[in-house]
Amino acid sequence: MKVLVTVKRVIDYNVKVRVKSDNSGVDLNNVKMAMNPFCEIAVEEAIRLKEAGIATEVVAVSVGEKSCQEQLRTALALGADRAIHVEAEQELESLNVAKLLAKVVEAEQPGIVILGKQAIDTDNNQTGQMLSALTGMAQGTFASNIEIKDDKALVTREVDGGLQTIELAMPIIATTDLRLNEPRYASLPNIMKAKRKPLETKTVEELGVTIKEHTKLLSVTPPEERQAGIKVADVAELVDKLKNEAKVIG
Amino acid sequence: MSILVIAEHDNDTLKSATLNTVTAAAAIGGDVAVLVAGSDCQAVAQEAAKISGVSQVIVADNVAYANQLAENMQPLIVELAAGKTHILAPATTSGKNIMPGVAALLDVAQISEVTKIESADVFERPIYAGNALAKVQSLDSVKVLTVRTTAFEEAALEGSAAVEAHGAAHDAGKSSYIGEEVVESERPELTAAKVIISGGRGMGNGENFSILEAVADKLGAAVGASRAAVDAGFVSNDMQVGQTGKIVAPELYIAVGISGAIQHLAGMKDSKVIVAINKDDEAPIFSVADYGLVADLFEAVPEFESNL
Ligand SMILES: Cc1cc2nc3c(=O)[nH]c(=O)nc-3n(C[C@H](O)[C@H](O)[C@H](O)COP(=O)(O)OP(=O)(O)OC[C@H]3O[C@@H](n4cnc5c(N)ncnc54)[C@H](O)[C@@H]3O)c2cc1C
């Protein structure tokens, strides 16, 4: 069985973002970029499936500018066997990304596609579900456990009330939640080896997808800053403030 | 404008997230219908019929919808989308699970976690963990939105909408529900609570959360947690507040032993009053706290409780 795993290049999660003064977006100049943390979890899960003898090949795919090849190399260093870069110069909406991925799925015929549940830049939480609807593959979103047995998968999902387990007919789409696994780090020898692993480039035209504009970004603005308040000296003062100043407790 | 709101429920009771979503729908303006898809869910339909501003409740009562599996819900919603201008669901794990596929099948975008309705086609939503707000215009004929419930008030329950059954059953046969580990609690739900007390890595272990529970008992509060506390196994995942957990905005949020990483702040910084108890006077949580107390939580929290 083949595993297809998606990776997105995003701003590093430790970076405090700044909105551009012309309100056209977020300033990404000279900002540290990294693999989306949920994609790291996806890559880790794919590699574990291979280590467990369930998967035979791990293929990493990324849609984006040339620079996202850096994240594909990271996926290769972590243990993916080969990579596919779908070139797209502009920032694509989730539906367009899902359509491109659906074409890759059609060509690769994976048994499971693993995606991060959301990217920490747009916070959309859509692409996996859209890919599922477009391909007709069943979906296990926000997964904290994936168990594959023959032609079925048991997926435990992090839902608002706790944990839910569903059974899906293979092939499936899974999206990762935080507690699916703890991603490993790439070792230096593996980083060197990754440079020689195959990385294939495809264009939007080659995949035969017409990119459609569904939304227009009108502006990006910083949220209202919350003012830091005061430090209270002790518990008695805290209780007094909450009762008599903020009036939030009786 | 003709709007369809997808109700959130457990076949017995309507979840309040539906009420916030109806308020967002009302802000768009026009006719609002609510879909109650479930199994043996007539009681929910009756409740939904009382939501102010709703003109019609559509009930799809069939075992195929008992657990609102995405593969079965999507064709139903797509079918009901005919003639609609907007389809809204709360941005709960259920709404997030179902709606993007609905959008894809309709060949339209989904606009996630909408926090403000500017007009019928312009919406505001947070990006980058709430560190920026994007104003987005939809160019699609049908707008598919998920709604951040904390950004909208709950609609009142003073209406009397017509209830209509929708017969079609869609069972894709690709997925089935096996079971659930639901944490039963007498406390209010995190996303609806007026007061929340949350613990982080500083709590040390799960047993120590009992000191937060004692405070919660006195304040009628819900208990939340940081990701670090959940990852460490102190408490269950449903308690995580943050960018990738639950978004909350109570009247009072008390953060105990939580440093205040941006991912945590993203989930609670719209709370009305924030209290932080942390022994590190430079913890970033203090930069958003109205009242900060630099103290060891194991002394401060029990003392706080006995002062209530
Ligand atoms: C993709 C991604 C998504 C994430 N999503 C979320 C999310 O949704 N929610 C979330 O919370 N985090 C999230 N995180 C994690 C986040 O970055 C932080 O790691 C996490 O919030 C830290 O939790 P904490 O504050 O409990 O732990 P720490 O940062 O370790 O802070 C512990 C605090 O406790 C204090 N303390 C310790 N002992 C005591 C004591 N005895 N008395 C008083 N104070 C004490 C310390 O001074 C410290 O400030 C995410 C991270 C990533 C990468």
Image (cartoon, grey):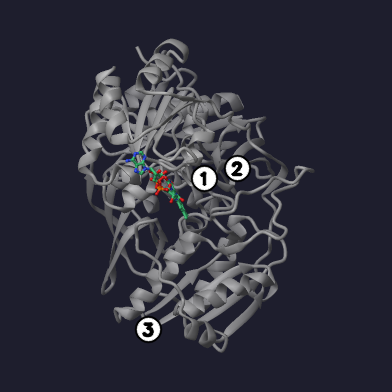
Q: Residue at x 41, y 21 (%)?
A: B162
Indicate the position of residue A149 as horizontal and vertical percent values. Answer: 25, 72
Secondary structure of the residue carrying tag 3 is loop
| Disc sitting over residue A56 in the figure | 3
Q: Nearer the viewer, residue A244 or B267?
A: A244
Beta carbon at label 1 within 8 Å of ligand 1: yes
Q: Residue at x 57, y 70 (%)?
A: A62
Q: Nearer the viewer, residue B125 or B214?
A: B214
Quarter occupied by residue A240? top left
Indicate the position of residue B13 as horizontal and vertical percent values. Answer: 29, 29
- Tell which residue pokes out farthest to the right in this image: A22
Q: Residue at x 28, y 46 (%)?
A: B204
| Disc sitting over residue A93 in the figure | none
**Residue B60 can be seen in this image:** no
The chain carrying label 3 is: A
Secondary structure of the residue carrying tag 2 is loop
